[in-house]
Image: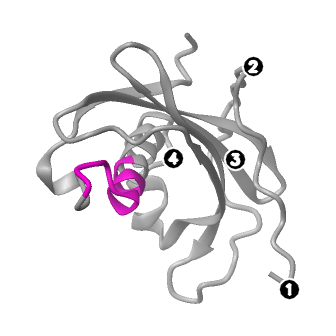
Amino acid sequence: MSKLVYSKDYHIESTHVDATKRLSLPSFFLLFQDLAIEHAELLGVGKKETIDRGILWVFTSVKFEFYKMPNYLSDITMSTYPGDRRSFIFNRYAKMIDKEGNVLAKGSTSWAIINSETRKLVVRPDLKDIPSHHEDDELSLPEKVTSDE
């Protein structure tokens, strides 16, 4: 596996689940966000290069397929890696698997960088290049959102 793929093991606790004792969507996205932040730090585009310089990473679109949500006390592994950059959009992929290696969820996200004060896009971010990685089973990127949606 490429060093561009960042993985972390999680144990699903009571604070992660909903009334059905399954991982809640808000908890899933918090775990994914924390994973992406940790990976950005390792890639050299973390807090020091962004927030401390007045710029923020923000989701522009998200696409996930969930096959099975893990239950309370389950052990899972989440992984993420950067995809190709498109102009000022940075793509990222993710996967969640159980301890047997079954894919529970996979997704693709697009991120942009905005100025924390003006909330405008930073079209030419002064960041180091982030190399991309691809896997055969990754989910296609989210479609562009139109005004009708």
Query: Could you give the CA–CA distance between mark 4 and mark 2, rounded to whole angstroms?
Result: 26 Å
Q: Is residue 13 left or right of residue 143?
A: left
Magenta span contains residue 26: yes
Q: Which residue is mark 2?
A: 136
- Residue 1 percent coordinates (x, y): 55, 10
CB contact under 8 Å: marks 1 and 4: no
Q: Secondary structure at mark 2?
A: loop
Q: Indicate whether 145 appears above or below 133.
A: below
- The answer to which of 102 and 139 lies nearer the viewer is 102
Q: Earlier in the sequence, mark 4 or mark 3?
A: 4
What residue appears at the point 24 percent right and 54 percent down from the top-left corner? 17
Residue kind at label 4, given as amino acid type? Val
What residue appears at the point 32 percent right and 28 percent down from the top-left corner? 76
Mark linked to residue 91: 3
Q: Earlier in the sequence, mark 2 or mark 1?
A: 2
Question: In the picture, which quadrant includes the C terminus?
Answer: bottom right
Residue kind at label 3, given as amino acid type? Asn
Query: Nearer the observer, disc 4 or disc 3?
Result: 3
- Residue 37 percent coordinates (x, y): 41, 48
Q: Which residue is mark 4?
A: 45
